[in-house]
Image (tube, helix red, strand yellow):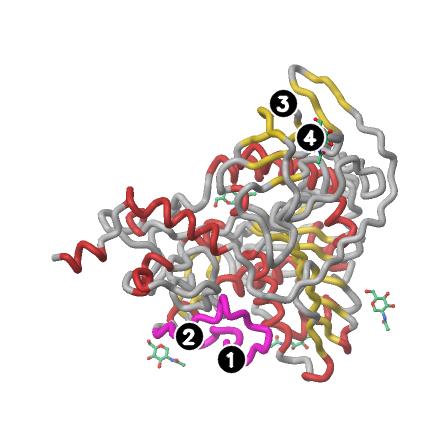
Amino acid sequence: MQQSQRWKWSKKKTQFPALVFVLFLFIAFSNLHRERSILKIQESPDLVLHRQDSFTFVKPNLFTLQNHAPGVLNRFSTCNSTREYSGQKILWTARTPEYGHRRESLERCDVFSGKWVFDNASYPLYKESDCPYMSDQLACHKHGRPDLGYQYWRWQPHNCNLKRWNVTEMWEKLRGKRLMFVGDSLNRGQWISMVCLLQSVIPADKRSMSPNADLTIFQAEEYNATVEFLWAPLLVESNSDDPVNHRTSDRIIRPDSVLKHASVWEDADILIFNSYLWWRQGPVKLLWSAEANSVCEEVDGLGAMELAMGAWADWASKINPLKKRVFFVTTSPTHLWSREWKPESEGNCYGEKSPIDSEGYWGSGSDLPTMNMVEKVLNKLSSKVSVINITQLSEYRKDGHPSIYRKFWEPLRPEQLSNPMSYSDCIHWCLPGVPDVWNELLFQFFSCALRTGPATVNAGVTQFDSLKI
Ligand SMILES: *[C@@H]1O[C@H](CO)[C@@H](O)[C@H](O)[C@H]1NC(C)=O
Ligand SMILES: *[C@@H]1O[C@H](CO)[C@@H](O)[C@H](O)[C@H]1NC(C)=O
Ligand SMILES: *[C@@H]1O[C@H](CO)[C@@H](O)[C@H](O)[C@H]1NC(C)=O
Ligand SMILES: *[C@@H]1O[C@H](CO)[C@@H](O)[C@H](O)[C@H]1NC(C)=O
Ligand SMILES: *[C@@H]1O[C@H](CO)[C@@H](O)[C@H](O)[C@H]1NC(C)=O
């Protein structure tokens, strides 16, 4: 009786530790770290305020390091004081699409709508132990996961087939280019997946990986290409920009500037952005560029994310899509409450061995108001940014998370060990696994035709292909 009580997962009692644990999970996975991030952009420092209806609009991305009144944010930054959100919004305007076509050009076949099919003949696309760049946070088999089913699922769109992953073809597209992932630990997982998918055909002495830092670079000599990851979990400048020692509570952002990170990502040829989970942890403090006395404002996560997306969109709206390809990866869902797919149960993703098969399943891990806001922004940018909409397909994959089968950075306490559910990671994804499929979807955008089915290529993809990206 006592035993079973202990194993029970009372909602009320454990909600708080669970949230704390979510925060804990954001602690990155290396001790190495190096300072970089020197700004080199020079622009006019004028701050333009526009009054429109009852909002005050701030024009973003004007202040640079040289003319930053309050200095660069780092993890020691604090607010002098905090007042209520003034209601200032970011002013950015989508330019008329000079290039005519929507970038998400696989639209005749919605590759994001489909189902998971067990396929142990073609999957996994690589072996966990064959990838020297695998992260201990994601190597589930190595950390004792006994069931390997999560590695064997193929994503099957309803109306067409995905082109098969072809590593040589992908390298040809990447020749002479910099591919950069920018975002949080979920995006880092996708980057590691990409490196694992790509590295096998490169001889060991012809490839290298730089030490973990703000920017981490995988390089393949013979293709003169790099696959990089830039840690920027909140897109805009923040006090959480150190990839190892970041702040998870008391987050302060510079809501009106991506310039610090943009100075790093500016020269990449292909950019893959994400941002979501870091906005889901309660209120965020805003330190506007024009604020000289470190007086912050405070706003809820969704409001803060909308500002950051605005500052990012202002940057994205100015790219030339013939020179640079930009992708945004949507919300990666979490599976923290098993009652959402198995009513009356009191667990999380721990012990789950197969995907959810109810079509259209949607759990609380993918916040709809956030998704709607992001969709609105991305719709306005449709001629510049392609969307990799991983949310629905990943919602099905309650079996894909590491749960207890990963390296944990803090020693586990006896009460945790006696209740594995209590320390399960139901946020990140095992590799090989779900993020490999996100990259296969990316590969569809890099290739010109879908194999069979009603899908055809429209002008957008052809255009992209002519870029040889
Ligand atoms: C694939 O799975 C089937 C059914 O579970 C099994 O019989 C078969 O041996 C597996 N094949 C491989 C290559 O693992
Ligand atoms: C993979 O791509 C390369 C280069 O485009 C091509 O030569 C090769 O036939 C492809 N392999 C498969 C299995 O399709
Ligand atoms: C390698 O690629 C870079 C662009 O990323 C280019 O500037 C450089 O000329 C290339 N080098 C060679 C040897 O092709
Ligand atoms: C805090 O505010 C006071 C005045 O309100 C100012 O003198 C001081 O420089 C501010 N501190 C910082 C770190 O900006
Ligand atoms: C992604 O797909 C979901 C439905 O599967 C939709 O609700 C969401 O708005 C889409 N996001 C974007 C940015 O298109």
Query: Which residue in the rendered view is the most extreme toward the top?
Result: 53
Q: CA distance from mark 3 to mark 1?
A: 52 Å
Q: Which residue is mark 1?
A: 129
Residue 144 covered by magenta stretch: yes
Q: Earlier in the sequence, mark 4 or mark 2?
A: 4
Please provide percent x and percent y for residue 244.
60, 59
Image quarter where ligand 4 lies: top right
Side (left or right) of 357 relative to 320 = left
**Up-down relation of residue 247 to residue 214 (above or below):** above
Q: Which residue is mark 2?
A: 120
Residue sitting at x 53%, y 44%: 249
Please provide percent x and percent y for residue 261.
73, 49
- Mark 4 residue's CB less than 8 Å from ligand 5: no
Q: Earlier in the sequence, mark 2 or mark 1?
A: 2
What crowding class fits label 3: few (fewer than 14 Cα within 10 Å), some (14-19), or many (20 or more)? few
Please provide percent x and percent y for residue 97.
75, 38
Which numbered marker is on residue 86? 3
Q: Are marks 4 and 3 in contact (CB under 8 Å)?
A: no
The secondary structure type at the circle numbered 3 is loop
Q: CA distance from mark 4 to mark 3?
A: 12 Å
**Up-down relation of residue 81 to residue 239 (above or below):** above
Q: Which residue is mark 4?
A: 90
| Region in magenta | 121-146
Q: CA distance from mark 2 to mark 1?
A: 17 Å
- Quadrant including the C terminus: bottom right
- Of the residues shown, which amino acid type is indicated by label 2? Asn
| Nearest-to-viewer mark from 2 and 1 | 1
The secondary structure type at the circle numbered 1 is helix
